[in-house]
Image (tube, rainbow, N blue to C red):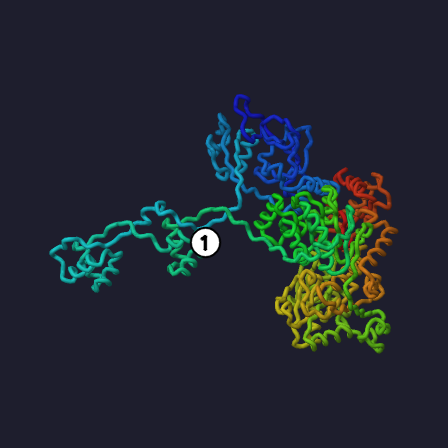
Amino acid sequence: MSGPAAPALLPEPRNTTASARVAVPWRVAVPLPVPAYDFAVPHGWVNPGAPGEAPLGCRVLVPWRGELVVGLVVGEGEPRGGHRLREAVHVLDDPAEPWVTPATVRAVTAWAADAHLPAGLVWCDLLCVGWESLCTHEVRAVEGADLNAFGPRAPGNSWSDAVTFAPPLLDAVREQGLLEEAFTALGRTRTVIAARDLNDVPAEARTVTLLRAVSPLPDDLTPKQRHACEWLAAHGPQTSLSAWARGAGVSSGVTTGALNAGGALMVAELGEAPAAWAWLREHGPADSLTAWANGAALAGVPLSVTQAGALAARGWAAHVQQPAPPPALPEPAAGTEGATDPDRLPEAPVWRLHGGRAVNRFRVLAPRIARLLSQGRGVLVIAPEHAALRRAWEGLSGLAQISDTQAVQISGQLGDAQREHAWALVRSGAARLVIGSYLALSAPVEDLALLVVLEEGSDAYKLQSGSRAFIPDLAARVAAEQDAALALVGVTPAVESIPHPGAVLPPPRTRLHVVDYAHPPEQPELGPLSGVHLTPGDMGYPLSHDLSRVLRQVQERGRQAVLVAPRRGYSALLRCPSCEHTPQCRNCDVPLRFHQETRQLTCHQCGYHEVIPDRCDNCGERMWKARGPGTEWIAQEVGKLLPGFPVYRLDKDRQDDLGPLMAGENGVLVGTQLLLSHPAPPNLAVIGVTLADTWLNVSDFRASERYHRLLRQLAEWHPDRAPMLVVQTFQADHPALRVLAEGRDTLAYPAAEERVRAELFYPPHARLAQIEVTAREATKSQLAAQELADALHGAGATAQEVLGPAPSPVARVRGVYPYHLMLRARSDARLAQLLAVLDSRTWKARVRVDVNPRGGL
């Protein structure tokens, strides 16, 4: 709340908080998990392009808890009660060039409101650049104001750097309207070592003390002293007594006696500049003292880092700030394959392109992108993870050059300075092709015509913390608000993409062999490797007879193989063979996973770990039986099967150096799905899925879709060849696997799944939101969840729209008991109406909303 206005007899200060309200307040989001708040317009500020309108998408400095923080203007506030608001202090961006495109701001903020999420939380997740204010800040008291009431350290009548005052003190003065503030924008700077001008070097640094002979020499000198003085007169001044003694061929005692007898004098004179200073003057500035010392030494000027520091301390060099050069950005690829091909893609607001390999999809996509760029319009491509981003950059970035523009990358792989530079290129219009991760979604692309979402069904788009947004949902809102086409491109379409028009490319050649653990006698019909004599016990686990045989062939032929495990660690659990007891986590109702390398049992939910018990807590049995192989177990089995053959691991716990494997050397790589974020080994001959059923045994209606996508991604992983794909499973007749065995295209399974979901009223025929209610007591959580369900039904929700409440599949997680309600609505608008019930009262447990939940219910 602002205080009383400044007295009328005082001049109106610049950027004060006591001015009269004449404009609609601004709604500002700060990078915190809080809603957007209203702030008054800075005193005297007028939007030059649209007077009276909020500078949507611009950054502003606003007072927040006694300090100034950077916020983003996301809309107009409520005019009523505007006189009680704090004022925004300074506008950082020109409204003609906002930091974020206004259409993007409207789309994201509307989505946050519909999803019942704080705008600050969503923008903190999405906006990766700009939350730091790069500017100088000076303050002074307004003319005639007496700030003695604020203490002796309050600002005076002259401009002073704001950092010399405590932020709470400045905010208290600011709130009373007695503070005048000035801001000057700064670019990024760097500190370098520069040689000072000779006239600026302190006199004491340039002055040297020399020994000079006097004339005439005193009569009382000894013969040796006289010889030393004559030598000094003939050979010039010396810097020390020892140097004089060495030159004259006498002892130091003789030169000391000659000096004391008056045969020489110590005089102060301006000496020659050091050679190291001359080198720095000519070749500098240097990035550091080390760089100065190394550079001078390479040029033949002896200089150590210590000596360089001493010269700087004496004043021969100084640490100075200078504008930092633009950081290096990823170089665009040279290839532009397909840019001149005919554009055969649909002309629709939303369309899709799936099938083939990544290089084929990019070649089909290239003509559309090249045409839009040549028209001066913008294109944005977002990828779910690093591997897809790398492929997209290699396949599409070269299109910018032929269209007289630039391509930039925006992702978490870049540093802060690199992202800021890329953002500036996009904001200025110099770069109209942006390829990046979800962080690129808010990039201010000029005249956006096409937004491409790669692998739109990937779970990597689901943010695991914060807003838990599913990025393709936001991308659809942004594309619609900017009147840009939305393209969904990937190896296989998400079920939600099926209703849209699109193109399907022929699938890559797939060599599939299925190991059916459930029906071993039928194995001869599925591949040439099995025999009718095999029984379930003979088939082997976790490496089946068939998989073991092809792995031996890999070793014999010096090739490469990859085994995909369903989990990290050694096993999913340890079980007592006598009483079936399984050690459980203390904080969660899940078994502890066994990690053999650390000899510990670990919970993958909360991180709790303990050493392996010596005996069973129930019956005292000393033996444990492992169940559910992980990467450690499978790698161990491969080592036994192929002695001496290199075995590598890649999972969250361990990332081996894959350099030899990527250089073509033979070996077996065992890992989780993390494998797909890396390039395929070049001589890959076999890919084994050790137990495919793990991806199906998940309480998620998307489990089979996720399984189908994994198989398709493995089939196209290698860019050139078709490794044998060996799938070990108890469900060999599952439709997601059968479509691959039958050689059908990537549309076949998602289309069938879409028809099933239509009958069950699931996406794309409904919009989902999961409400999670948690408490430390199960009863309290259950009662709060039921109370919430009753409130939803009381507000008009039908039984089809509200499912639950029901306990979570994991009854206790991190010490709390989650209960879930699932909302199913026919549209985003109806879903927003249902979620609005959450604001109707205060609930007796923690309530969290997850729109478009993924990865398990």
Q: Is residue 211 left or right of residue 192?
A: left
Residues packed near mark 1 inside 10 Å, few (<14), some (14 to 19) or many (20 plus): some
Q: Is residue 10 left or right of residue 344?
A: left
Q: Is residue 305 left or right of residue 166?
A: left
Residue nearest the viewer, comparing 132 with 808: 132
Residue 352 drawn above or below residue 597: above
Residue 365 at x, y percent in the picture: 73, 54
Q: Which secondary structure lies at badge 1?
A: loop
Residue 222 at x, y percent in the picture: 13, 60
**Quadrant placement of the N terminus:** top right
Residue nearest the viewer, comparing 620 with 769: 769
Residue 107 image-quadrant placement: top right
Residue 672 drawn above or below residue 552: above
Decide if residue 210 is in sight here.
yes
Residue 252 image-quadrant placement: bottom left
Residue 221 at x, y percent in the picture: 13, 58
Residue 248 image-quadrant placement: bottom left
Farthest residue, direction left: 219
Residue 394 drawn above or below residue 766: below
Instruction: Name the amino acid, label 1.
Output: Ser
Farthest residue, direction right: 759
Residue at image position (85%, 65%) is 733
Residue nearest the viewer, comparing 596 with 411: 411
Decide if residue 779 is in sight here.
no
Mark 1 lies on residue: 288
Please state the total of marks drawn on the protein image: 1
Residue 87 at x, y percent in the picture: 60, 32
